[in-house]
Image (cartoon, grey):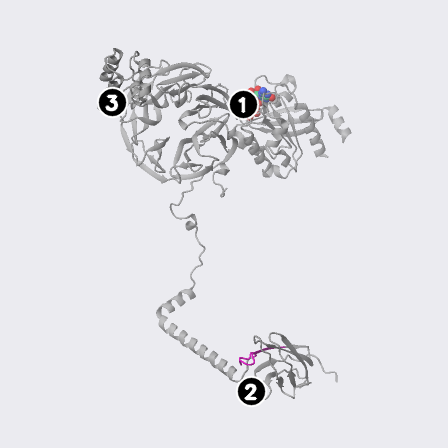
């Protein structure tokens, strides 16, 4: 589980890389569309290869798809009445209208009221109709109206201005007879419970428009219950509360600010100014968590006070809340451009889910019969379904903040003994004297060692010859239990290539103790590098159980100073001479 | 033994066996057990089980006491408390619920690795239920998805069933009865 944090908590229920769903988090919803207790996934597909569609998935299969007339901007499932069986309706916002589907059949279409039309613009088109002005003048006049623009131009005039000179004639002929209308479009949609907080309570639709307004619609009559205005066009919205009691609408706007609307006023109550434009907006309890363009995740209270901010490893693609009321668990899912989905509870990263492609929409909730289902769609149109394990537990892994956990583990340090304390005190009191005494002893030791070394060199007592002409090495082995011993001397010429000649070996020993077969031996020519064993036999003549040293000298013929000297500690003879 | 069994059968003295009936919610556990009961004892309406219920039915030589556990997520942690008593397991799978096959596998793996089950040769009977539903997976596919071939130390058997009509149930119960008989000798 350490190797893949987050991987252990989810079961991979389904992955279809070619499901052909191109959508965003605002256009997906989970709802029990057939009233059988099994939730379906409703998707407003913005199309790509296949055209705009309303798709419904159940389990691993696509259950239905029907064409949409216009690009969906948002989708919501809601209960619009109290009829049995309790089956929610689906509202799809596209263009200036909300299309309401019941049992997946078109049921009702609500269109926003038209906006005020520029009087000058109306005049100009009037004159065109009467043939007073030509297209060139029309173009010039519309341009100038657009520049003054206290009331913006209609879509028709804007379209006209964008046309090539060749196409203008046909366009004017086609449209000049119709009156001009100015129509705003819906940018976001959400639901708000009417009067009860029940799971299946009747809900109002809340819609945000390009004209910077927020409308609340009555679910049965589809009349506007309330209209509120914002300083800029809204792009994302979260709604909580009940219309008849108290509610709060948190809106992220295109000017990079978040506004909070309340029941009692038609103007925003609080404003949160963000450091960068918001990409995702999720409410957790009473707080708002926002993912921004500057790769940060920030949290604010409902009054706009900043709580925390964390830096993300990649740009945010989408966000959704992960709410498990049965386990009292609330967290935020953040889809990132580096093909990961991060799960945050407060500012702690709980787990990371790797995805085969960047995620464009996330939805968490009950799907089929499984409460903890995570549904994601990818940029390339894939559909991923993961199910939270029944036994999954999330632990706060508090990133790089604070001390490492090992720091709080107590070490088993032994108690200070009396001796330890006394020594420490002594070291503190007479540190200088102790140091001096130590240095003196060290010098003495060095002197003694050097003296011994010089003596050894002078008397050639070493079993290594340092002479340049005859570099030799020798070691001696004594074999046997006694009284007869075999003495083997391994002589080696350590020179690189020069052989050594005219060497001899002689022994010095106590003649009352030992008898040697040949106490003087000549050594053959020594080829460099080879080891020559020279053997002789020593007999111990004493039966008193004592032993002595036998000295071995390697001599050069004609020189009295030995090249090498070795002292052999003879072992005590254990055997008894037979004769 | 065969003679004694037959004798016992004639005398109406049947050996008692405790069986656990496990599987996800809505897989059809209660429906299956209801079908196995004598027709005069069958319930008409079947509602989702809360917690668990104890049912009894008899075969030619055995008398079964079945713990029909609820498969809902919040009750699944009850299962393990009955593992010790269970002498055999019936594991029911909704073969039409492809999405939750992973969940069924997860629960099965947890069951097989439980200390009260792991080292016992408990026979496991798998019912790949709802075979009547269109697009339901075959029993072969179900056993592949649950990796049943990895169960080496326990006797197991899978059969496709339709609990509403009672099809396929008898084959499974016969197998279970044989297993329990051989287990006891
Ligand atoms: N089509 C079909 N439906 C079935 C079959 N078996 C059961 N069902 C239906 O599946 C639903 C659930 O059956 P139950 O027996 O209550 O399921 P359960 O496994 O006991 O569920 P829990 O008690 O909640 O764990 C009921 O509506 C049954 O009618 C079957 O073989 N085919
Ligand atoms: Mg049941």
Going by the image, does A327 lie left or right of A475?
Answer: left
Cα separation, mark 2 vs mark 3, equals: 121 Å
Cα separation, mark 1 vs mark 2, equals: 111 Å
Quarter of the view holding residue A258: top left
Q: Chain of mark 2?
A: A
Callout 1: CB less than 8 Å from ligand 1: yes
Look at the picture and state if B115 lies above or below A71: below
| Residue A379: percent from left, percent from top | 44, 31
Q: Which mark is nearer the camera, 1 or 3?
A: 3
Residue A395 appearing in the image: yes
Residue at mark 2: A561
Residue at mark 3: A143
Residue A215 appearing in the image: no
Frontmost residue, A200 versus A222: A222
Quarter of the view holding residue B115: top right
Frontmost residue, A49 versus A326: A49
| Residue B56: percent from left, percent from top | 63, 24
**What is the span of residues highlighted in magenta in the rendered image?**
A463-476
Q: Is residue A326 magenta?
A: no
Frontmost residue, A160 versus A75: A160
How many numbered markers are drawn?
3
Q: Chain of mark 3?
A: A
> Mark 1, residues whose alpha carbon is within 10 Å: few (<14), some, or many (≥20)?
some
Residue at mark 1: B48
């Amino acid at each position: 589980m350490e190797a893949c944090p987050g991987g252990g908590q989810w079961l991979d229920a389904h992955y279809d890389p070619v499901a052909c769903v191109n959508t965003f988090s605002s256009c997906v919803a989970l709802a029990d569309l057939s009233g059988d207790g099994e939730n379906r996934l409703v998707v407003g597909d913005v199309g790509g290869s296949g055209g705009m569609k309303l798709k419904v998935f159940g389990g691993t299969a696509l259950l239905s798809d029907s064409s949409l007339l216009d690009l969906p901007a948002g989708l919501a499932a809601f209960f619009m009445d109290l009829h049995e069986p309790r089956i929610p309706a689906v509202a799809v916002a596209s263009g200036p209208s909300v299309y309401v589907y019941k049992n997946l059949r078109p049921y009702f279409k609500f269109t926003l009221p038209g906006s005020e039309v520029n009087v000058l613009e109306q005049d100009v088109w009037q004159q065109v109709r009467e043939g007073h002005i030509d297209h060139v003048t029309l173009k010039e006049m519309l341009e100038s109206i657009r520049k003054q623009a206290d009331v913006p131009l209609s879509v028709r005039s804007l379209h006209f201005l964008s046309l090539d000179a060749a196409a203008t004639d046909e366009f004017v002929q086609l449209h000049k007879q119709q009156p001009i209308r100015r129509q705003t479009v819906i940018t976001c949609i959400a639901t708000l419970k009417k009067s009860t907080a029940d799971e299946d309570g009747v809900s109002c639709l809340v819609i945000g428009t390009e004209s910077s307004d927020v409308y609340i619609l009555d679910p049965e009559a589809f009349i506007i219950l309330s209209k509120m205005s914002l300083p800029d066009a809204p792009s994302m919205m979260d709604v909580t509360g009940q219309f008849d009691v108290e509610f709060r609408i948190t809106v992220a706007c295109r000017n990079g600010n978040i506004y909070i609307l309340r029941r009692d006023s038609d103007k925003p109550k609080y404003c949160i100014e963000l450091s960068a434009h918001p990409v995702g907006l999720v409410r957790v309890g009473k707080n708002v968590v926002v993912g921004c363009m500057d790769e940060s995740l920030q949290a604010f209270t409902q009054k706009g006070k900043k709580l925390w901010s964390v830096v993300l490893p990649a740009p945010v693609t989408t966000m959704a809340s992960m709410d498990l009321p049965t386990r009292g668990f609330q967290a935020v899912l953040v889809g990132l451009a580096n093909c990961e989905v991060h799960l945050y509870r407060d500012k702690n990263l709980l787990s990371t889910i790797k995805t085969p492609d960047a995620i464009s929409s996330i939805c968490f909730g009950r799907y089929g019969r499984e409460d903890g289902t995570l549904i994601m769609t990818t940029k390339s149109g894939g559909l991923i379904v993961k199910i939270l394990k029944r036994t999954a537990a999330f632990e706060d892994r508090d990133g790089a903040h604070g001390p490492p956990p090992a720091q709080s583990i107590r070490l088993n340090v032994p108690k200070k003994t009396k001796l330890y304390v006394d020594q420490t005190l002594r070291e503190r009191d007479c540190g200088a004297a102790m140091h001096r005494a130590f240095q003196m002893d060290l010098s003495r030791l060095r002197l003694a060692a050097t003296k011994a070394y010089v003596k050894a060199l002078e008397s050639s007592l070493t079993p290594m010859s340092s002479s340049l002409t005859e570099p030799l090495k020798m070691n001696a082995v004594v074999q046997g239990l006694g009284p007869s011993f075999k003495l083997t001397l391994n002589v080696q010429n350590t020179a690189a290539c020069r052989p050594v000649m005219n060497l001899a070996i002689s022994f010095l020993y106590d003649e009352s103790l030992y008898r040697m077969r040949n106490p003087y031996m000549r050594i053959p020519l020594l080829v460099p590098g080879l080891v020559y064993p020279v053997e002789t036999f020593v007999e111990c003549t004493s039966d008193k159980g004592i032993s002595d040293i036998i000295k071995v000298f390697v001599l050069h013929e004609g020189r009295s100073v030995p090249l090498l000297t070795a002292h052999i500690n003879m072992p005590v003879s254990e055997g008894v001479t037979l004769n | 033994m065969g003679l004694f069994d037959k004798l016992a059968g004639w005398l109406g003295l049947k050996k008692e066996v405790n069986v656990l009936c496990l599987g996800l919610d809505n897989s059809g556990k209660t429906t299956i057990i209801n079908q196995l009961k004598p027709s005069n004892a069958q319930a008409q309406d079947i509602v989702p089980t809360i917690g668990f219920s104890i049912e009894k039915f008899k075969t030619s030589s055995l008398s079964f006491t079945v713990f029909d556990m609820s498969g809902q997520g919040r009750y699944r942690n009850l299962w393990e408390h009955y593992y010790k008593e269970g002498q055999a397991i019936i594991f029911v799978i909704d073969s039409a619920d492809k999405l939750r096959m992973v969940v069924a596998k997860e629960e099965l793996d947890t069951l097989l690795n439980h200390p009260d089950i792991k080292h016992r040769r408990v026979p496991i009977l798998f019912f790949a239920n709802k075979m009547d539903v269109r697009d339901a997976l075959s029993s072969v596919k179900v056993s592949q998805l649950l990796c049943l071939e990895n169960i080496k130390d326990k006797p197991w058997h899978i059969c496709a069933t339709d609990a509403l009509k009672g099809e396929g149930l008898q084959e499974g119960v016969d197998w279970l009865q044989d297993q329990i008989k051989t287990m006891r000798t």
